[in-house]
């Protein structure tokens, strides 16, 4: 071998050959690196925390808007009218026929007297308009609530057509114009939510990835030195990748804790500056599934950010 190309020094070997010992060694090195470079790691963790907090706040708003939309959609109903009062046996028979139509959820019979009571309640303060009006002039009806998958305008229209075929029903109404507007609003909300959510995810990935690149760039001398002494690529990369995962996990945990604190503060103090109490309005925190995915997303951000950043200094 020529003098200009000396043989590489023996590559460092891991202290332990077992899988558990090797992982423990890399983990210890990652934690040691984080302690030695505290300022840089705090910057990375803070960036991940802020980025995931923004994303989680958006998800919290989106989940509650979806809850409001779901509540509104539950009010979509089809009303079947009759020209006379039904007996108990007729009600049972018709309900059985209606329940056979796909999409039926709940059925409520509204007698003529009950319809008049509702009419009076809606005109409270203007009861004089109902003088001389008796229950006989109002029709009896079935108010039918539909299942969640049958509340869009096309499904409601198909349901109404099938309902009209049931013997004994003289008229069917479902507020066609309101249903169309409501479904247009829901579709618009979901499209806007998907676009904003996608933009936020891309922004978070970009910010976190570039922050991790800066932290690794600040330690480029360490990477180059390990390569010169013959360390394998895996030996160099592993602690940095684990370190990125730890940074992501800590950042995700901090973001979720801050989100929970903000939620509780808003929940119990918003009544001071809002005209309604959010707790009574049903404001909900993120479901457990979302929290798990946000935490795992933070860990993956750290891993992926480290892997992509290391490629600039280490090929392969």
Image (tube, rainbow, N blue to C red):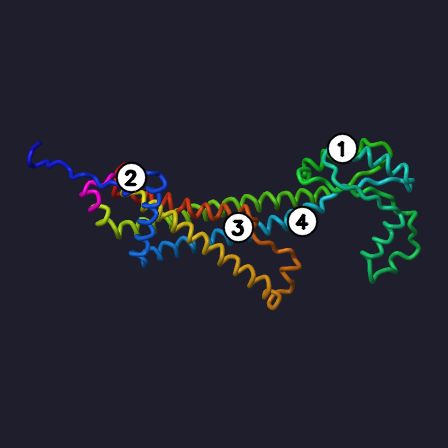
Specify whether residue 59 is painted magenta.
no
In 3D space, how far apart are the residues under numbered discs 4 and 3 (Cα atoms)?
A: 18 Å
**Which residue position holds label 1?**
101
Lower sequence index among marks 3 and 2 = 3
Residues shaded magenta: 225-234
Vertical arrangement, residue 228 with respect to residue 262, above or below: above
Q: Name the quarter where the N terminus is drawn.
A: top left
Secondary structure beneath label 1 = loop
**Which residue position holds label 3?**
59
Q: Residue at x 59, y 51 (%)?
A: 65
Q: Position of residue 107 (x, y in %)?
A: 79, 41
Left or right of residue 115: residue 104: left
Lower sequence index among marks 1 and 4 = 4
Mark 2 and mark 4 in contact? Answer it, CB < 8 Å. Answer: no
Left or right of residue 78: residue 250: left
Res. 234 mark:
2
State the residue in front, 217 or 115: 217
Res. 183 mark:
none
Lower sequence index among marks 4 and 3 = 3
Depth check, mark 3 against mark 2: the one in front is 2
**Which residue position holds label 4?**
71
């Amino acid at each position: 071998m020529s003098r200009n190309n000396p043989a590489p020094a023996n590559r460092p070997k891991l202290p332990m050959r077992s899988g558990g010992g090797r992982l423990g060694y890399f983990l210890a090195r990652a934690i040691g690196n984080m302690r030695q470079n505290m300022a840089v790691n705090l910057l990375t963790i803070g960036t991940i925390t802020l980025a995931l907090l923004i994303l989680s706040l958006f998800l919290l708003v989106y989940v509650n808007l979806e809850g409001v939309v779901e509540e509104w959609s539950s009010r979509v109903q089809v009303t079947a009218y009759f020209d006379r009062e039904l007996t108990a046996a007729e009600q049972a028979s018709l309900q059985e026929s209606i329940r056979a139509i796909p999409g039926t959820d709940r059925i409520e019979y509204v007698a003529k007297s009950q319809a008049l009571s509702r009419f009076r309640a809606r005109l409270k303060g203007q009861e004089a308009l109902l003088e001389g009006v008796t229950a006989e002039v109002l029709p009896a009806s079935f108010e039918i609530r539909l299942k969640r998958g049958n509340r869009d305008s096309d499904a409601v229209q198909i349901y109404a057509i099938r309902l009209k075929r049931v013997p004994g029903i003289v008229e069917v109404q479902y507020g066609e114009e309101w249903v169309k507007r409501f479904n247009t609003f829901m579709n618009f909300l979901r499209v806007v939510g998907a676009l904003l959510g996608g933009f936020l995810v891309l922004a978070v990935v970009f910010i976190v990835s570039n922050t991790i690149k800066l932290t690794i760039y600040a330690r480029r001398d360490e990477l180059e030195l390990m390569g010169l002494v013959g360390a394998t690529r895996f030996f160099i990369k592993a602690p940095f990748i684990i370190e990125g995962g730890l940074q992501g996990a800590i950042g995700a945990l901090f973001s979720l804790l801050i989100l929970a604190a903000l939620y509780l503060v808003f929940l119990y103090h918003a009544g001071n500056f809002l005209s309604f109490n959010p707790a009574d309005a049903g404001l909900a925190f993120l479901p457990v599934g979302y929290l798990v995915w946000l935490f795992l997303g933070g860990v993956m951000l750290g891993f992926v950010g480290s892997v992509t950043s290391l490629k600039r200094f280490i090929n392969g």
